[in-house]
Image: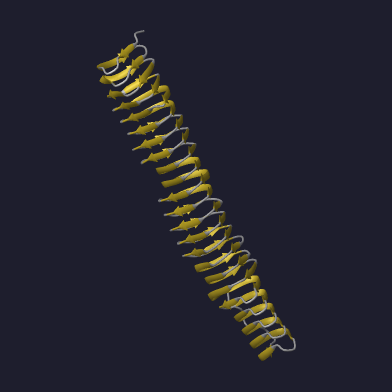
Amino acid sequence: MTDAKVPSGARVRLGTVEGDLRAERNSTIEAEGAVRVSGTAEFEGNVDVVGDLSCRSLDAEGGRVRISGALSVEERLSGDDAEIEVGGTFRAGAVDVDRRLRLGGPAETGVLEVGGLLGGASTLTATTVSVGGKLRLEGKLVARSLEAGGSVEVGDVELDDLEVGGTARLGGGEVRRKVEVGGRFRVDGAFAFGTLETGGIAEFRAPATGGNIEIGGVLSAENDLAFADLEVGGVGEIRGNGRGRSVRIGGKFSVGGSLTLSGPLEIGGKVAVRGALAAGDVEVGGKLEAERAVLTGRASISGALVTRAGFKAVEITLGHRARASGPLVGGRVTLERRAEAETIFGQRVGLDRLARAQRIVAEEVRLEKGATVAEVVYLRTLSVEEGARVGTAQKVDALPPFPL
């Protein structure tokens, strides 16, 4: 076995090395065809390799190693306080680089760990990827997991798990299990995911489908969004259609298309659905707007309710001073003190003190003191307390068909 040594500042031509290769600071190695090292390639300080390099293992220390061509490391590539640049294709059993790793061509490895910056112009396939600082990859990343302490920018991804301490921007792809981002998360293309949790902002620029979503600040979806449970601490916007199990928004929520939920909708502020709303229970602290709404559960509106085609639920409660525009249809409909509505259809309709309605069509109607109704059509009973006012009242043998 014959080892090879390249002195500091030297420029040499090498082909096959049957043993180990040691290159000292500021040296240059020109490949005769390719540099093939049967043992370990050791680089101290800044070293340039012009051409392709293959070796069993590679150790770089205290500088920058540049390989203009392809790099193939059978076992482990180690960079101690070093940075590595590879112009061509890259293969390694495992990678541990303290400072930077830059990849010019397609790359494939097992466990990949970089303390500072990982950059690439093509695709990267790995078992796991861990970056202490930034990841910049123009192509596709395929791995079981990606973890970055700073920020991530990747073309497409195919991952099981993604965890980023700062910001993440993806071209699209799939994260099968979990996405966790401390700051801002953005996806420009079609995206599928298991669960998503971000402390700041989540942006979807194309259709996205996933499981539970939890966002501390703002949700922005420019197209359709499908999910399981959606929870946003601040403001949420879906410009296309929304579909899921439940939605809980601390502030304002808007949907440009229709919103279809199998479970509850809870909004602290205002919710506006340009198309149809379907949900289980609905609780809104401010205003609800929709073209139409059909619920399988109960609704509690504290502010205002505006629909054109109507609002239907098993039970509807308009809170103190709440206002409703558009027909209300429910099994039980209650207007609390000083609430107002236009037309109400229901089995049992009750107006508390000083509540007002234009028209009520119901089986049973109850009006407390100070309540006012212009017209009442009822099937069974009409209870009117002293001080309540009814314009006209008609008892019928059968109620007309209800809307919705």
* Location of residue 10 in the rendering, given as x and y in whole percent from the top left corner: 26, 17
Left or right of 163, for residue 262:
right
- Residue 385 seen in the figure: yes
Left or right of 64 in this view: 214 = right
- Residue 229 versus residue 13 in the image, above or below: below
Q: Residue furthest top?
A: 1
Q: Quadrant of residue 395?
A: bottom right
Of the pair 240 and 387, the residue shown nearer to us:
387
Number of numbered discs on residues? 0
Q: Residue at x 60, y 72 (%)?
A: 312
Q: x, y percentage for residue 133?
A: 44, 37
Q: Quadrant of the N terminus?
A: top left
For the rendered model, the colour scheme is: secondary structure
Say above or below: 319 vs 137: below
Tell me if 33 is positioned left or right of 58 in this view.
left
Residue 108: percent from left, percent from top: 40, 31
Q: Position of residue 90 (x, y in %)?
A: 36, 29
The quadrant of the rendering that contains the C terminus is bottom right
Task: Write the residue at 65% across / 73% down.
Answer: 317
Q: Nearer the viewer, residue 308 or 302?
A: 302
Instruction: Tell which of 189 and 286 is nearer to you.
Output: 286
Is residue 172 at least partly visible in the picture? Answer: no
Q: Quadrant of residue 119?
A: top left
| 80 vs 268, nearest the viewer | 80
The residue shown at (34%, 22%) is 45
- Most extreme residue toward the bottom, as rendered? 392
